Image (cartoon, grey):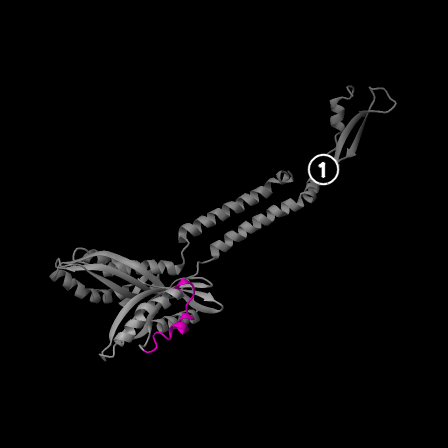
Amino acid sequence: MSDVRWSRRRRLRPEPDEHPEARIVVAPARHESASDVTVEVVPVKSPRSDLLTRRVTAFPAQAMLLLMAVALVGAAIWLATEEESAPVVSPRVSTQVRAHVEDLLSYQPDTVLSDIPAESEFLTGDFAEEFASQFRSTTGPDSQSGGISADAVVADVGVVSADDDEVTLLMFVNVSYTTTDSAEASTRGSRLVVDARLVDGEWRITGLEPV
Amino acid sequence: MRLLAFPRWTWAVVMIASAGLVATLWAVDGGQDGRSPADEAVEVARAQVLDLTTIDTESFEAALESLRARSVAQANSKLSASAKPFAEAVQTSLIETTEGRIQSSGVVSSSEEKAVVLVASSAKVSVDNAEPVLNYYRLKVTLAKVDQEWKVSDMGFVS
């Protein structure tokens, strides 16, 4: 090998255009002395073919990374174009809850207690029991003893927050009170925050707080 | 270990996409603070109601200026007319308003260009150093989008 001159090796080096996938092998020829060498050009895998191989073998992982990149870009585009939507409540929801509130706050002396079971159907959770207790202990007896009637009308409704099965509404409610002693009604305006939940396809009140 | 053998361009794509996502999240979060356009309208409505219901002798001019700044041009003349009784009252009496608060607010309706908001507020009002009286207010505020800003186009007490 030592007899092989560098100039010769350079001369025999294949031109890249001729054999792009070749390399020079310099080795002692068989059955010859160590000083005799043969020089041959053998094809080898070019970097390009190597890349191709790597592409094939690494494809699943690369595909995973590419999918991640596409997902990230997609998420970025979605976030950029998505506009936060205002709390949307269908007219049915506000109409239903509004009607329940008007029914709950309206009463007559002769039916104020007997209406409790039917009105409790509009309610759910702890509030159902609180409402029934309040009407049995205070509102009902006061109405019966004083001949007090109440007529509630919701003047306006706004959505504080909403999702698929829960809603919080701000209601401006006017309640007109009359007694058997006086034909003249006294009207009281209130601001109520009403919580409602969708239970078995029906909106039921879970809280009702004056603010 | 195979993951480490990826071509550099693959990592570059992932890094650029990640940077894009982070930048977008920052822009969305920073720009809108996670709020909807209706939330921005509600914020303006609440500020307007608080200024209106806490007007007193000391703050009258500044409050009126703030109210005008949040209103559309067409509403300013109506606002001036509405404020006239306040102007006369604060000139003839010492009105002091304290503890102005917004209790709640809700969206009646909203679109890209218009929103209607209910606001419940309260404030203690004292006239000529008398005992302060706690007043509760119910207001409905109509807003319009003008040059990308929500402006009050109408406001009134709900009876």
- Quadrant of the rendering where the N terminus of chain A is positioned: top right
Judging depth in this view, the residue of A63 and B16 nearest the camera is A63
A176 w.r.t. B16: above or below: below
Q: Residue furthest right?
A: A31
Residue B95 is a magenta residue: no
Instruction: Classify residue B152 as left or right of residue A70.
Output: left
Residue numbers of the magenta segment: A110-127
Q: What x and y, as percent, mark residue A59?
A: 67, 45
Identify the secondary structure beneath mark 1.
Answer: loop
Q: Quadrant location of residue B133?
A: bottom left
Q: Quadrant location of residue A39?
A: top right
Q: Residue at x 80, y 25 (%)?
A: A27
Judging depth in this view, the residue of A116 and A152 nearest the camera is A116
- Name the kind of residue labelled 1 in the image: Ser
The dominant secondary structure in magenta is loop
B107 w.r.t. A18: above or below: below
Residue A158 visible from this viewpoint: no
Instruction: Classify residue B60 as left or right of residue A190.
Output: left
> Which residue in the structure is indicated by mark 1?
A46
Q: Quadrant location of residue B148?
A: bottom left
